[in-house]
Image (cartoon, rainbow, N blue to C red):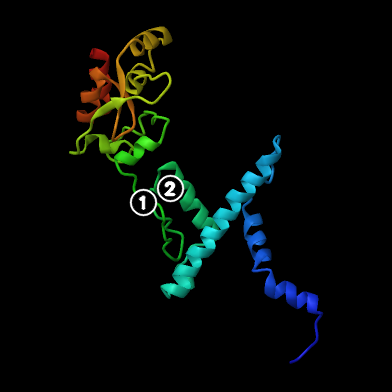
């Protein structure tokens, strides 16, 4: 059916290059929605970051649907796409795939290699969960790869293993044991360790034995 419409509407729809769609995608998950901007250039900075994320998502969909001819149902939503980007920026990967979803989720998050962890300036913390030899984030400490100690990038490095082993003791004793040691960083695990704890950290898997060995040292 033919119908008339003002020329200005046609020019807007045909020549704005999808700017309305870009704004719509950006407003769905705005980072700065509730942020007070004390500097005038913060608005420009966050606008640029969000436009970058929208453009990346549009290119992702275009490549998968039009170039590689994949089914639209197998392509991530904008929410899933941004979620994977956050995990990649944090150097993390999803633990398990959500079983409640009807379709598998594509992932742009690759496993963090040993040398990439050095780009994370803040060293990883140590706890009973991260030290678990089966499911912990630091389970790679027990693998057969070569682990080397390098100078710590932290301003005030503290042996994380000594702090963990003495965490249930008196604070003064714990602080005395942690301070005053030569501390470096494992180039694979990205954990601050003293020289005495470096070998124990990479050889002892049982947490009770690990704690007792550190206290013995």
At 79% from the left and 79% from the top, the residue drawn is 7
Q: Is residue 38 visible?
A: yes
Location of mark 2 (residue):
88
When asked about the image quadrant of residue 71, the answer is bottom left
The reply to whether callout 1 and callout 2 are in contact (CB within 8 Å) is: yes
Q: CA distance from mark 1 to mark 2?
A: 7 Å
Which mark is on residue 137?
A: none
**Direction from residue 160 to residue 33 in the image, left or right:** right
Location of mark 1 (residue):
110
**Direction from residue 204 to residue 57 in the image, left or right:** right
Mark 1, other Cα within 10 Å: few <14 / some 14–19 / many ≥20? few
202 or 10: nearer the viewer: 10
- Examine the rendered structure and indicate whether residue 16 appears above or below residue 107: below
The quarter of the rendered structure image containing the N terminus is bottom right
- Secondary structure under tag 1 reads loop
- Examine the rendered structure and indicate whether residue 215 appears above or below residue 202: above
Q: Which callout, 1 or 2, points at the residue further toward the start of the chain?
A: 2
At 41% from the left and 24% from the top, the residue drawn is 154
Mark 2, other Cα within 10 Å: few <14 / some 14–19 / many ≥20? some
**Direction from residue 106 to residue 7 in the image, left or right:** right
- Secondary structure under tag 2 reads helix
141 or 48: nearer the viewer: 48
Whole-percent x and y of residue 56? 51, 58
């Amino acid at each position: 059916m033919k119908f008339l419409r003002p020329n200005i509407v046609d020019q807007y729809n045909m020549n704005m290059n999808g700017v309305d769609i870009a704004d719509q995608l950006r407003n769905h998950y705005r980072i700065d929605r509730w942020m007070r901007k004390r500097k005038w250039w913060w608005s420009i900075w966050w606008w640029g970051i969000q436009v970058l994320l929208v453009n990346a998502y549009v290119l992702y969909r275009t490549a998968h649907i039009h170039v590689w001819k994949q089914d639209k149902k197998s392509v991530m939503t904008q929410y899933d796409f941004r979620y994977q980007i956050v995990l990649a920026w944090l150097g993390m990967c999803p633990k398990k795939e959500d079983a409640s979803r009807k379709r598998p989720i594509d992932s742009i998050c690759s496993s963090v290699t040993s040398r990439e962890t050095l780009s994370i300036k803040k060293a990883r913390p140590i706890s009973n969960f991260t030290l678990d030899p089966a499911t912990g984030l630091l389970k790679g400490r027990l693998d057969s790869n070569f682990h080397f100690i390098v100078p710590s990038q932290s301003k005030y490095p503290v042996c994380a293993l000594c702090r963990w082993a003495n965490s249930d003791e008196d604070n003064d004793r714990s602080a005395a044991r942690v301070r005053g040691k030569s501390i470096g960083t494992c180039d694979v695990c990205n954990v601050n360790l003293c020289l005495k704890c470096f070998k124990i950290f990479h050889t002892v898997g049982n947490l009770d034995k690990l704690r007792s060995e550190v206290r013995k040292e």
